[in-house]
Amino acid sequence: MDLLSQLTTSFQNSFHTDPLLICSPGRVNLIGEHTDYNEGFVLPAAIDKAIYLAVGPRSDNELHFVAHDLNKTYQGSLDNLIPTTTWADYLLGTVAQFRLSGHEVGGFNCVFGGTIPMGAGLSSSAALENGVGFALNELFNLGLDRITLLKFSQRAENDFVGAKVGIMDMFASMMGKADHVIKLDCRSLEYTYAPLQMDGISIVLCDSRVKHSLVTSEYNTRRSECEAGVRFLQTFYPEIKSLRDVTMPMLDQHLRDAEPLIYRRCAYVVQENQRLLDGVAALEANDIATFGQLMYGSHEGLSEWYEVSCPELDILVDIARQHPGVLGARMMGGGFGGCTINLVREEAIDTFTSLIMKQYKAQTGKDTYLHVCKIQNGTSVVSKAVDHNK
Ligand code: GAF
């Protein structure tokens, strides 16, 4: 039985009615890492790995959730929305945003599961939050737009779960468009879709299989370090609002000697923003070779200046560099584990796969998992009829 059929059957068995089915994808980001919360640019896309939710309204105020993949359940009430420090917080936190914004939602049932590996840096949590928000909007006919819904997801993560993430993951998952990347200005939330024209080149993810346990605390620390840099520079340039407004000469003049660690963090962000702008120009010119070099530059910055990589991610990128069929590679997402993103010539995928698997095992003792990505639409109602006899 496929996953959708399993979720549907589980929902029917538990709640004796048919569910609404929602698909909410994970994301990749081609370049522009740790720039979103600095009001810079990002270049993400939604992918063919998703969280699926089977949902239905209840006649009372209760919340009944089933995490199919974890084999766990949660039961609570709309009248008691407080963090549990478990997976249920992604759902509860999203529900709480509707109520805080004055939108009437009732109790509901939800069975969810997915194909996004957890902790792989592919934004399973943003996909889940978006899926819940999208479902509530449908179930209770609220008529909210996608931007409002994805902002609820971010607030759920920031205020309820306690991870001070930027807007990129929920934006990509909610707003994704098949075969396009999103160039998003994280200050204004203006965005454009750019067709991903990379003839004969595929996006391949390599999962380090390292779970990022440090990510929340270190992520929040990086964010504070960037904010500290902005505060310091504001004494010289009061007009500055974020690292988006900062240039390398400003950093070199005022921060390099005074605050060396903060300087390195801020310099990475300022340079990464520029790499993204250069990368977009390279993609427009169909110059994938230049784009690939920018990806390597991004990884170096993340590893050496921003210090959010880990030995396993560095090894994956080093191995990729050795293969002539790879145009670019870098760690992706928050860091401290998860996946690398690689641009690989299609005819080289098989030899790249064997090289990575062999070398990664030899150097780390771990297996890696590769996935050739397709770029998909964002969060949506699943229209596919479910065949329960499969
Ligand atoms: C995580 C966060 F959720 C994003 O907002 C972004 O900051 C990313 O790390 C780093 O670019 O995925």
Image (cartoon, helix red, strand yellow):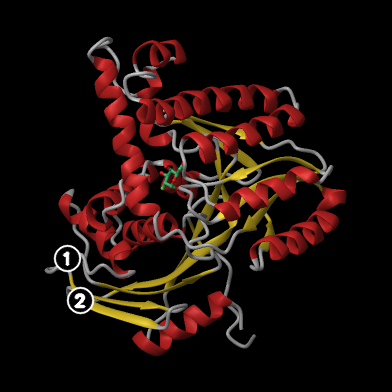
- Ligand 1 image position (quadrant): top left
Viewport quadrant of the C terminus: bottom right
Disc on the earlier residue, 1 or 2: 2
Query: Circle 2 is placed at which residue position?
Result: 76
Return the residue nearer the eye: 158 or 387: 158
Task: Determine whether label 1 and label 2 are within 8 Å by CB.
Answer: yes
Residue type for callout 1: Leu
Q: Give the residue number, with chain letter if any, for mark 1.
A: 81
Which residue appears farthest toward the front when viewing the image? 257
Q: Where is residue 33 in the image (x, y as percent from the top left)?
A: 50, 38
**Residue farthest to the right, as pictured:** 347
Kind of residue at badge 2: Gly
* Along the viewing direction, whichever of 179 and 88 lies nearer the viewer: 88
For residue 55, which quarter of the picture?
Answer: bottom left
Name the residue rendered at 44%, 38% in the picture: 34
Percent coordinates x, y for residue 266 in the rendering: 40, 27
The numbered dot on residue 146 is none
